[in-house]
C-alpha cells in the first residue's frame, strides 16, 4: 500500500507479474520507514473489500517502482558551480518538501503527475530556487496552468513565482511538460514567464 | 508560499475515508469533458505518478499468520521488525539456522505461494 502524506492512497499491484520483484525488493532492502517510493503506472478501479481485508482504495498498477531515501535524492541533485553546497542543500530540501506537501498532490491528476515528475527528474528547478534564495528572493508560489501551446490541455506550464524579500518584486519562471501519456516529457525548459491577461 | 492552480476545482482525493463512502471506481471521472478541456489538468488522469511511502498491509488474516510462522522459524533475535519481515520475504540477508519462506500473494491465482525455501 502506498501512503501519501500519511494518508492511504493506493493499493499497489504490478502491471506485469514479473514486476512483483520490484515491490518485494523495495519492501525488503535496508531502509528507513520514511524512505520514499515513486510509483509510475496506471490507475485502476477501487479495490473490492474482499481483496485487501476490507480496505477500499484505488489500485495502482505500477510499471515502475523505486524507493529512495529523501536525503539521497537531495544529495544527488547536480549542483550548479556558481552555488555553494552550503546554500544548495537547504534550498533543494525545502523545494522538495514543499512539493510533497501540496494538498492536491495525490499523483493522479495531470498537474500532480507533472509536479512529481519535476521533483524527481528536472534539476533545473532546484538550481533556480537556490539561485533565488541567494538573491534574497523567496519562493512564493507554484501554479499550474494549461499551456498556450496546446488547446487540448496536454501541455501544462508549471509556474514558479519568486518575490524579492526587500523590494517585493515578483518574477515568474515556467517549465512546460506534456502530461498526456503515461510517459511525461519536457516540452520547454525553465524560462521566464510572462502571464497574458 | 501559495501552492495553487488556475481555475481551482475540487478534485477527488483517493483517501481511505473517501473511498469507504464512495465505492464507485475513479475511472468514470477520469475522462475530461470536451466542453471544458482547460480543466483537464486538474482532473484525475488514467495514470499515476505518485511519491509516497510504502506500507505493508496483509490482505487477509491467514496471510499475516503465515508470515508470522515464517518469522518464528528464523533466528531473529536483535532484529528490527522490518529486518525480520525482510527475512520472511526471503530477500534479506540469510540468517544462520533460518528457514526462509518467500511468499507472494497473487490474487489472480487466489492464494499464497511459498517458494524459494532456504534452509541454513
Image: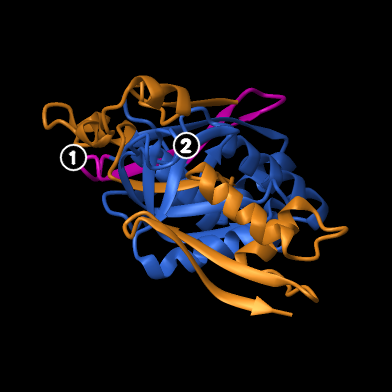
Chain colours: A blue, B orange
Q: Nearer the viewer, residue A111 or B75?
A: B75
- For label 2, the residue is A9
Residue B33 in the image: above or below residue B9: below
Residue stretch rendered in magenta on the structure: A148-173
Dot 2 surroundings within 10 Å: few (below 14), some, or many (20 or more)?
A: many
- For label 1, the residue is A151
Q: In the drawing, does residue B33 fall left or right of residue B68? A: left
Residue B40 shows which numbered tag? Answer: none
Instruction: Give the residue drawn at x 25%, y 34%.
Output: B40
Image quarter in which the C terminus of chain A is found = top left
Verify whether residue A163 appears in magenta.
yes
Dot 1 surroundings within 10 Å: few (below 14), some, or many (20 or more)?
A: few
Residue A119 in the image: above or below residue A195: below
- Number of the front mark, 2 or 1: 2
State the image quarter where residue A139 is shown: top right
Instruction: Give the residue drawn at x 75%, y 65%.
Output: B74
Verify whether residue A164 appears in magenta.
yes
Amino acid at each position: 500500500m502506498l501512503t501519501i502524506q500519511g494518508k492511504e492512497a493506493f493499493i499497489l499491484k504490478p502491471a506485469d507479474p514479473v514486476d512483483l520483484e520490484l515491490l518485494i525488493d523495495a519492501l525488503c532492502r535496508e531502509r528507513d520507514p520514511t524512505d520514499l517510493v515513486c510509483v509510475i503506472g496506471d490507475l485502476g478501479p477501487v479495490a473490492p473489500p474482499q481483496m485487501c481485508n476490507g480496505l477500499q482504495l484505488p489500485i495502482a498498477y505500477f510499471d515502475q517502482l523505486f524507493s529512495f531515501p529523501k536525503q539521497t535524492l537531495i544529495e544527488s541533485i547536480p549542483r550548479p558551480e556558481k552555488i555553494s553546497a552550503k546554500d544548495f542543500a537547504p534550498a533543494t530540501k525545502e523545494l522538495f518538501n514543499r512539493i510533497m506537501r501540496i494538498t492536491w498532490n495525490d499523483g493522479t491528476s495531470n498537474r500532480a503527475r507533472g509536479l512529481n515528475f519535476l521533483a524527481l527528474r528536472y534539476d533545473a528547478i532546484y538550481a533556480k530556487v537556490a539561485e533565488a534564495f541567494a538573491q534574497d528572493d523567496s519562493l512564493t508560489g507554484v501554479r499550474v496552468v494549461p499551456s498556450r501551446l496546446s488547446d487540448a490541455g496536454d501541455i501544462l506550464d508549471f509556474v514558479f513565482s519568486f518575490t524579492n524579500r526587500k523590494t517585493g518584486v515578483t518574477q515568474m519562471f515556467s517549465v512546460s511538460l506534456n502530461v498526456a501519456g503515461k510517459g511525461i516529457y519536457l516540452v520547454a525548459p525553465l524560462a521566464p514567464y510572462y502571464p497574458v491577461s | 508560499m501559495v501552492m495553487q492552480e488556475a481555475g481551482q476545482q475540487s478534485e477527488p482525493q483517493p483517501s481511505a475515508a473517501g473511498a469507504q463512502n464512495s465505492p464507485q471506481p475513479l475511472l468514470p471521472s477520469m475522462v475530461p469533458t470536451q466542453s471544458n478541456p482547460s480543466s483537464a489538468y486538474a482532473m484525475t488522469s488514467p495514470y499515476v505518478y505518485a511519491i509516497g511511502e510504502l506500507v505493508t498491509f496483509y490482505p487477509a488474516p491467514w496471510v499475516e499468520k503465515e508470515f508470522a510462522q515464517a518469522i518464528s522459524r528464523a533466528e531473529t533475535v536483535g532484529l528490527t521488525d522490518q529486518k525480520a519481515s525482510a527475512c520472511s520475504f526471503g530477500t534479506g540477508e540469510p540468517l544462520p539456522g533460518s528457514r526462509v519462506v518467500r511468499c507472494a500473494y497473487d490474487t489472480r491465482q487466489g492464494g499464497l505461494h511459498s517458494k524459494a525455501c532456504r534452509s541454513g
